[in-house]
């Protein structure tokens, strides 16, 4: 069985990328092994834990069960793309403030899921936030402070909206 | 600095994805190893043919059980004992031809990439001779032919017992005698990062980079497993994605080390899949308990008896220490003149039980705290009142293991806080006589927990401080950050004693056994207590060394010197900056001697932490569903070093405890012992959606044994939630479940049996 390679052109964290990938390769493998984006974590490789969550065209996906070749023409964002010149996004700051980080292995996936949720601009109840975030597993925090962080930034966003 | 909620020192790196875990450091051209697991539950390998696998393009090496050292080695993350009688049981080979459980390790493939390694595994041909499989300890303990390990004919790994007073006599004097049985399930740690390591050779030595809680112990065990001097091994521990005790065992690191020696020292990674993590690493033991107790008319315990049967699985790992720890808990905390305890730990053909957060106490506390409620029900007493009548107030000590003692004991204050939060008295009355299919209840449970392992085992920790040229400090420890916040609280401790800012303490997070001082690692809720003691001593030494050196720069200064936030003071007058002192210490042409401090400390203390959980639940009897309406854990862990981190630690433990009570269980096939649900889809750990709002509270008594008044906190939060939920269900429905998890299936069956359905 010979390797079958295919060229994938896509945007990753705002930059045009062209990579030859094995057609069997997952997006997770492409991001980690070819592009060195190691914030994308491997927890189960079958789409159960959410540690490998990245944003593809504005939607969260488990990159471990998404073929690299499907990324052709897509806009992909990983955690590495959030911080700009040492400045964190508001949700990243809120994770620190609220004590939402322990071992840190699930953190990248959670931050990406939260990022999409907040970018949608909807005001959600705490229960609805929990539901939206339940595709990511965490064993350290009991989720409480993670949900607090998301809720806090969502509230802030709506306070700002009210002011304008 | 101590007592403040400073942000985690690693928070920025973790929230930006920069924190490096083992898999993020794998070198280029690293070979991949995969393990061939047995497809039977018990038997021997009659023949193994690896010819086709070896011929596959891209395969570098195939090794089988025939190629590995003959001798056995132990795996648990205990300090080594120099006394033969106390050494861990050595019952494992790197690979085996004697299959003891479904999935046992028979062979390994090293290939150029993962796909090739996986394909090679499929080309290995194995013929077995099968033996009957036994997965239940209470059957296995009557022996099997052949025994699971040849030197344990009855499959009993170990038995222990003790007597205090005379239980038979105490039961005779009792007005009421209650007997009950309880059982806990096999569960798995489910850290989100699976165990992973890579190994290579450098200058004739083996370097292993691994996701472990115990780098110095891993080094020793690799040496033992391979039969090579321990100094020939170097273990590096990067950030780790959770451990919870699974990585307090030496898992595949010895095999990984062996494999690099088989391919000329080239780097080889051994990445464990999620399914392997469930089946082939470690689990929490399932333990069955038979309890008997007698009480007088006022509800005082007069006698109590515990029989425990622990399912060890196929290899010893932490083995009997876990059942024995639960046995110890049985004689603590509640006053009772006559106590008996006996525990059997039994080999079976199942995945291996090991350490998991709170080391045998979640099992024992489930049994004990359900039993306390069941006795209270039998004598028609409020279960909280029943506990209060029997709890020891203030100081108590263990009858056998000195100096284990509750040097401070905040249990009554904890109970008050918990009861107030949940509105115990009102709700016990309000929910007393419900009818219908939706019912509510409140329940509680409590626990006590030792801090560290002394005197059962050794407690030793090391710390090193290095004064940098700018007056900041490096802190190097053999103790490990595993997510619990160790690096942050150690930085706070050093800053506190040195009167510095936390930002000026640079802790080295990666452990490297060549560099970091000796410490046995993260387990037993020991680090803030034991390593904290070393940090304090080291910081005191450094403080004195700085002042001594400063004195050489200030020959005419006769006043008392002190250090405070970057300045040396003579009484209250700042006389020289710490930066100047530091710079001189490095570069003085007359008197240079860089300032470092190092200690290695044996800690011969142990102090008992305590706490409780109160839960309010709503039970849908028809659907067999439990909804947790309110839940609180209250802990007496002494003084908190970092209140926010402490609260986070409690939240995580509560989540694990709720999963234990409601949904988590590793199910095994009766015929083969094979896990039936060893994936994160089928094994139900708590999700955000399942989790109610969590409340954590504390009683902060300053413990005289703790270096900063602190005692155990890491593990205890995982203990009390499951029995509290079970007791709340008892209150709601009157049905006393004896086994967790309380899944819909179990609930419906229980409600049917009780005539509620």
Image (cartoon, coloured by chain):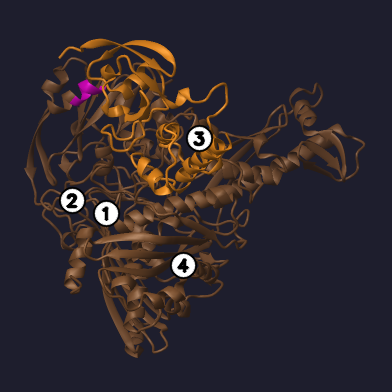
Chain colours: A orange, B brown
Q: Residues within 10 Å of mark 1 (few under 14, many from 20)?
A: many
Q: Which chain carries label 4?
A: B
- Distance, label 3 to label 1, CA atoms, is 37 Å
On the image, the x and y values in percent for residue B434 come to 31, 75
Of circles 4 and 2, which is in front? 4
SS category of the residue bearing label 2: loop
Q: Residue at x 34, y 70 (%)?
A: B370
Q: Do the residues labelled 2 and 1 touch (CB within 8 Å)?
A: yes
Q: Name the residue under label 3.
A: A91
Left or right placement of residue A90 versus residue B671 in this view: right
Q: Quadrant of residue B162?
A: bottom left
Q: Residues within 10 Å of mark 4 (few under 14, many from 20)?
A: many
Q: In which quarter of the image is residue A28?
A: top left
Callout 4 and callout 1 share a chain: yes
Which residue is at the front of the view, B675 or B54? Answer: B675
Q: How crowded is mark 2: few (under 14 residues within 10 Å), some or many (20 or more)?
A: some
- Distance, label 4 to label 1, CA atoms, is 30 Å
Left or right placement of residue B22 versus residue B671 in this view: right
Q: What stretch is highlighted in magenta?
A: B114-118
Q: Mark 3 lies on which chain?
A: A
Q: Name the residue under label 1.
A: B186
SS category of the residue bearing label 4: helix
- Distance, label 2 to label 3, CA atoms, is 42 Å
Left or right placement of residue B497 versus residue B529 in this view: right
Q: Name the residue under label 2.
A: B668
Q: Does the magenta stretch include residue B508?
A: no
- Distance, label 2 to label 1, CA atoms, is 9 Å
| Residue B266 appearing in the image | no
Callout 2 and callout 3 share a chain: no
Q: Name the residue under label 4.
A: B422
């Amino acid at each position: 069985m010979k390797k079958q390679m295919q060229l994938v052109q896509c945007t990753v964290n705002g930059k045009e990328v062209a990579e030859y990938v094995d057609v069997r390769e997952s997006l997770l493998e492409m991001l980690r092994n070819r592009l060195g984006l190691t914030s994308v974590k491997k927890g189960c490789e079958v789409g159960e834990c959410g540690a490998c969550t990245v944003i593809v065209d504005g939607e969260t996906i488990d990159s471990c069960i998404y073929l690299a070749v499907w990324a052709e023409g897509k806009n992909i964002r990983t955690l590495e793309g959030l911080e700009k010149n040492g400045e964190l996004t508001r949700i990243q700051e809120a994770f620190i403030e609220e004590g939402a980080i322990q071992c840190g292995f699930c953190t990248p996936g959670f931050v990406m899921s939260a990022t999409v949720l907040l970018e949608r601009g909807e005001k959600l109840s705490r229960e609805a936030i929990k539901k939206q975030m339940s595709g990511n597993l965490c064993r350290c925090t009991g989720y409480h402070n993670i949900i607090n962080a998301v809720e806090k930034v969502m509230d802030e966003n709506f306070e700002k909206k009210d002011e304008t | 600095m101590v007592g403040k909620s400073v942000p985690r020192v690693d928070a920025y790196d973790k929230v930006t994805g920069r924190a490096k875990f083992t898999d993020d450091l794998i070198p280029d051209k690293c070979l991949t190893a995969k393990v061939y697991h047995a497809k039977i539950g018990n038997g021997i390998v009659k023949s193994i043919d690896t010819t086709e696998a070896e011929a596959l393009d891209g395969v570098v090496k195939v090794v089988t059980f025939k190629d590995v050292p003959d001798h056995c080695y132990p795996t648990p993350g205990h300090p080594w004992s120099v006394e033969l009688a106390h050494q861990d049981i050595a019952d494992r080979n790197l690979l085996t031809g004697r299959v003891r459980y479904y999935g046992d390790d028979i062979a390994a493939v090293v290939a150029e990439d993962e796909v090739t390694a996986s394909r090679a595994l499929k080309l290995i041909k194995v013929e077995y001779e099968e033996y009957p499989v036994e997965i239940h300890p209470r059957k296995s303990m009557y022996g099997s032919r052949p025994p699971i390990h040849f030197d344990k004919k009855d499959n009993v790994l170990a038995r222990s017992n003790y007597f205090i007073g005379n239980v038979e006599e105490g039961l005779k004097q009792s007005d009421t005698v209650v007997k009950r049985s309880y059982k806990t399930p096999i569960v798995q740690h489910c850290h989100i990062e699976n165990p992973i390591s890579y190994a290579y050779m450098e200058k004739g030595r083996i370097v292993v980079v691994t996701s472990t809680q115990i780098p110095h112990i891993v080094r020793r065990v690799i040496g033992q497993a391979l039969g090579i001097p321990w100094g020939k091994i170097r273990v590096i521990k990067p950030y780790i994605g959770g451990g919870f005790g699974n990585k307090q065992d030496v898992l595949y690191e010895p095999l990984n080390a062996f494999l690099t020696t088989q391919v000329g020292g080239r780097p080889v990674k051994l990445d464990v899949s999620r399914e392997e993590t469930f089946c082939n690493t470690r689990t929490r033991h399932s333990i069955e308990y038979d309890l008997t107790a007698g009480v007088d008319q006022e509800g005082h315990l007069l006698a109590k008896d515990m029989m425990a049967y622990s399912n060890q699985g196929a290899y010893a790992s932490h083995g009997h220490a876990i059942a024995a720890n639960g046995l110890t808990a049985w004689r603590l905390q509640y006053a009772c003149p006559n106590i008996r305890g006996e525990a059997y730990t039994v080999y079976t053909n199942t995945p291996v039980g090991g350490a998991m957060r709170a080391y045998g106490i979640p099992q024992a506390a489930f049994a004990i705290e359900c039993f306390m409620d069941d006795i209270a029900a039998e004598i028609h007493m409020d279960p909280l009142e029943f506990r209060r009548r029997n709890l020891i107030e203030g100081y108590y000590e263990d009858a056998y293991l000195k100096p284990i003692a509750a040097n401070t004991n905040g249990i009554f204050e904890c109970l008050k806080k918990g009861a107030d939060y949940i509105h115990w008295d009102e709700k016990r009355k309000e929910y007393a006589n419900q009818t219908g299919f939706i019912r509510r209840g409140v329940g509680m449970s409590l626990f006590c927990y030792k801090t560290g392992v002394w005197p059962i085992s050794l407690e030793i920790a090391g710390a090193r401080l290095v004064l940098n040229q700018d007056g900041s400090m490096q802190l190097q420890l053999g103790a490990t950050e595993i997510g619990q916040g160790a690096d942050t609280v150690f930085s706070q401790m050093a800053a506190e004693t040195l009167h510095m800012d936390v930002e000026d303490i640079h802790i080295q997070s990666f452990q490297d056994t060549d560099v970091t001082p000796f410490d046995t690692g993260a387990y037993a809720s020991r680090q803030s207590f034991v390593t904290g003691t070393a940090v304090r001593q080291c910081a005191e030494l450094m403080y004195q060394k700085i002042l001594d050196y400063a004195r050489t720069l200030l020959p005419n200064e006769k006043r008392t010197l002190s250090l405070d936030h970057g300045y040396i003071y003579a009484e209250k007058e700042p006389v020289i900056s710490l930066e100047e002192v530091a710079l001189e210490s490095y570069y003085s042409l007359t008197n240079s001697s860089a300032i470092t401090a190092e200690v290695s400390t044996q800690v011969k203390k142990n102090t008992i932490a305590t706490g409780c959980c109160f839960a309010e639940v709503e039970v849908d009897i028809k659907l067999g569903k439990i909804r947790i309406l309110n839940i609180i854990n209250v802990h007496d862990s002494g003084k908190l070093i970092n209140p926010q981190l402490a609260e986070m630690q409690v939240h995580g433990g509560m989540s694990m405890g709720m999963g234990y009570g409601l949904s988590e269980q590793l199910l095994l096939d009766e015929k083969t012992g094979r896990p039936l649900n060893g994936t994160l889809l089928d094994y139900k750990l708590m999700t955000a959606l399942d989790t109610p709002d969590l409340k954590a509270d504390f009683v902060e008594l300053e413990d005289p044994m703790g270096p900063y008044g602190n005692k155990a906190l890491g593990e205890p939060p995982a203990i009390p939630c499951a029995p509290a939920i079970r007791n709340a269900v008892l209150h709601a429905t009157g049905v006393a479940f004896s086994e967790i998890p309380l899944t819909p299936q179990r609930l419906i069956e229980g409600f049917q049996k009780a005539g509620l359905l």
